[in-house]
Amino acid sequence: MNFSKTNAELEGLILEHDLLDQVEPGGSVAKTMLNLKKFAVLNPSHRVMTDRGERPLAAVLVDKAIEIARKERGAAALLEKLERYLNLDGYSLMFCAVDGLFETRKEPSGFTISMPAFAELPESASEVDLLLSANGFETAMRHLESARENITQRDWEAANGQCRTFLEALTDAIADDLYGADAAPLQGGLAKRRLLADKGFLSRAKHEFGEGKGHAFLPGLAKLLHPDGAHPGVSNQSDALFRLQAVVVTARWLLKRHESVLQERAAP
């Protein structure tokens, strides 16, 4: 979403927040806007002065996007798109009631975190990306990125499917990395999760893994992630985001445990 339609508006925004030394003019609105967005992404803690005191630049830009979206003809579609991207980072739009001539309507008033701060969802997502990259779990990385991309494109059913495939790719990769010789002849999925349980990486006693009709966490999560197949209309934004959040938190737990096993093996 672009914040300005002219160079004058964009330069005014940069001057207002004292960003001349940080954001290089690109010669066009599109290029200068790209430089501004890059700086905000690479410097999430950079603070600028506003009428409400010092605030992170990223938050100021989101507020500006909300302000502009409210004025556009396609406001509903723009706000829906903005909220999808905010949701992926663990935030949601806030709305207030505004009295109109004939009815009360809802208008966006800002944004807030979607979950309590202690849940650390954005931090979990970032750490998962780092751990996947550090361990070379590229197949799992691709499926997680596809799940996120499907959500931005409003393809909820495909996102659910990618979440489930991501979880399976991750447990396969952990089994291959920790117990390569035993994992090599096995097919992926259930067989490798069974191996992780046999080796003690997953606990049957604590119901982290189980088979048959017993209730266990990972088998239950796998069923929850994609219960209805890829048929359009059987899922929605809230469902897809919940599944993505659940799988990200689970992935962080598995990756941290994987990290601990590697550290124990490396200890003298």
Image: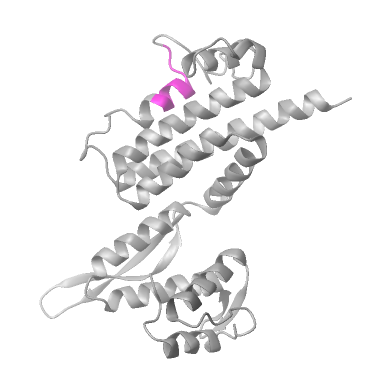
Residue 82 picture location, percent across and down: 36, 63
Side of 86 relative to 24 (left or right): left
Work out which residue is located at the far right of the displayed protein and give it.
268
Residue 162 picture location, percent across and down: 40, 35
Q: What residue appears at the point 72 percent right and 30 percent down from the top-left corner?
A: 260
Please state which of residues 20 and 88 is positioned toward the viewer in this rendering: 20
Tell me which secondary structure the magenta stretch mostly adopts. Answer: helix
Range of magenta residues: 214-222
Q: What residue appears at the point 24 percent right and 75 percent down from the top-left corner?
A: 98
Q: Quadrant of the N terminus?
A: bottom left
Where is residue 164, by image quadrant?
A: top left
Q: Please say whether residue 253 is one of the residues in the magenta stretch.
A: no
In this rendering, is residue 59 above or below 163?
below
Residue 230 picture location, percent across and down: 27, 33
Side of 131 relative to 211 (left or right): right
Where is residue 28, by image quadrant?
A: bottom left
Please state which of residues 94 and 47 is positioned toward the viewer in this rendering: 47
Q: What residue appears at the point 22 percent right and 37 percent down from the top-left corner?
A: 234
In this rendering, is residue 121 above or below 164?
below
Q: Quadrant of the C terminus?
A: top right
Where is residue 45, by image quadrant?
A: bottom right
Residue 215 picture location, percent across and down: 43, 17
